Image (tube, rainbow, N blue to C red):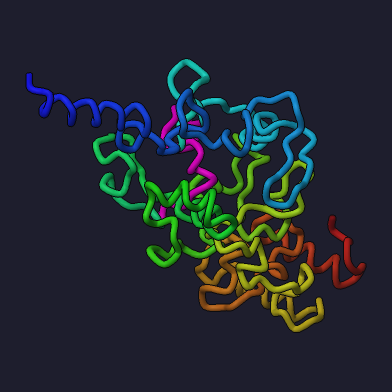
Amino acid sequence: MKKSSVLPVILIALGILLFGAPNSIAYLEYADAGFGGCDNCHGAFQDNRSYISLSDAADWGADLMDVHNIMVNSDCDTCHEGTTNFPVFMNHSNGGVGFDPISCIGCHGRAEDRGTAQDCVDPGSPNAPCRDGAGLRQHHYNSSPDFAGAICLSCHDDTDPANFTPVSEDVKPPYYTPDPDPNHPDKPVDPCNPNGKEDFAGTARGLDNDGDLVYDSADCNISTTSPGDCNSDGTVDAGDISALVLEIFDGDGNLPADAPGGTFPGDPLGSDANEDGVVDAGDISCTVLLIFNGPGACE
C-alpha cells in the first residue's frame, strides 16, 4: 500500500480514538463506562453521600437511589432492564407494575413531545420512544447553555427552545398515571404540584417539566384560591357546594389540574377541597366541614 493511501486511514483511526464513534457521547444511560452519562454532573445514583440538588441546592438527606425507590415503592423493573442492575437506560426498562417499559422518561419526559425513531440519537436503535425528554433537555439548556445545554444540543436539536416547543408544564409524564395508583401510592401525580407530591426529601419544588425554569403551579396558572373555593369567589360557602356538583359532572375528568375545562370552569385548587388529588364526592363533604368549621376542618 502506498503511503498516500495509508495516511487517511491513520487519521480516521485517530479521530475515532480521540473523539469516539458517531453518537458515542449520547446520554443513552444514566451512567456508563465511557463519556456519556448523567452521573458526570449528578454523581452515582447509588451513593453513600446525601444528594445535593443542582436545581435549588437542597440536601435530600439520602442518595438518588433511596429517594427514587420511595417514589416507585421499590418496583425495580420501573427503571431496570433484564436481570442486572447496570446499566440503566434513559428510555427502556422491564417496566414496573402498570408502567410502560420506558425507564427514566416515564417521569422526566412527556409522551406528547414524542417523535419517531428518526428523532433518536441512534436512528438504528429499536429502543424508542424518542424526544420524550425535550423538556428536561431544555431545562439543562436554559440553566447552563454553554455547558450542560451544549452537551445535550450536540445530539438533540430539540434542546434549543428555538427548535422545538415542549408541551406545557401541566401535561403529565406517563408514569404520573394512573391516579390513584395502588401499586405506587407515593409517586407524583400532578406536574403542577399543588399538593407538593413532586417534592421529595429536602427539596421545596418539583420538576421543571417543560424546561422553562418556571416551576409547578407558577407555570400552570393554578389559582392560589383556598381548598373548597371551587367557584374561586374568595369565600368557601354554599355556592361552592353547587359549583362542586357542576364540576364533578362537567365532563373534564376528576383531576384538579383539569378542573378549568369541561362545561364548568372549576378552580384547580379550590375544587380539591380535601386535597387528595381527585375531585369527587369526598370534596363535597369536606366543603361542608370547611363552611362550618373553617380551614383545616377535613385534613
Instruction: Look at the picture and state if 280 lies above or below 45.
Output: below
Name the residue: 37% across, 55% down: 157
Quarter of the image with the C terminus is bottom right
In the rendered view, does 217 fall on the left or right side of 211?
right
- Image coords of residue 138 (percent x, y): 50, 57
- Image coords of residue 140 (percent x, y): 55, 52
Name the residue: 75% across, 64% down: 273
Q: Compare residues 26 and 208 and report the one nearer the observer.
A: 26
Does the magenta stretch mainly form a helix, a strand or a loop?
loop
In the rendered view, does 281 fall on the left or right side of 20?
right
Q: Compare residues 70 and 243 and report the one nearer the observer.
A: 70
Instruction: Look at the picture and state if 274 lies above or below 60.
Output: below
Is residue 177 within the magenta segment?
A: no
- Image coords of residue 257 (percent x, y): 60, 64
Is residue 103 within the magenta segment?
A: yes
- Image coords of residue 286 (percent x, y): 79, 62
In the rendered view, does 24 fall on the left or right side of 1?
right
Q: Is residue 78 visible?
A: no
Q: Compare residues 137 and 193 and report the one nearer the observer.
A: 137
Q: Is residue 250 visible?
A: yes
Name the residue: 61% across, 72% down: 247
Instruction: Look at the picture and state if 231 lies above or below 119.
Output: below
Q: The magenta stretch spans which residues?
A: 91-112
**Quadrant of the rendered structure where residue 25 is?**
top left
**Quadrant of the rendered structure where residue 81 is?**
top left
Give the residue at the far top of this rendering.
83
Name the residue: 90% across, 69% down: 294
Give the residue at the far left of this rendering.
1
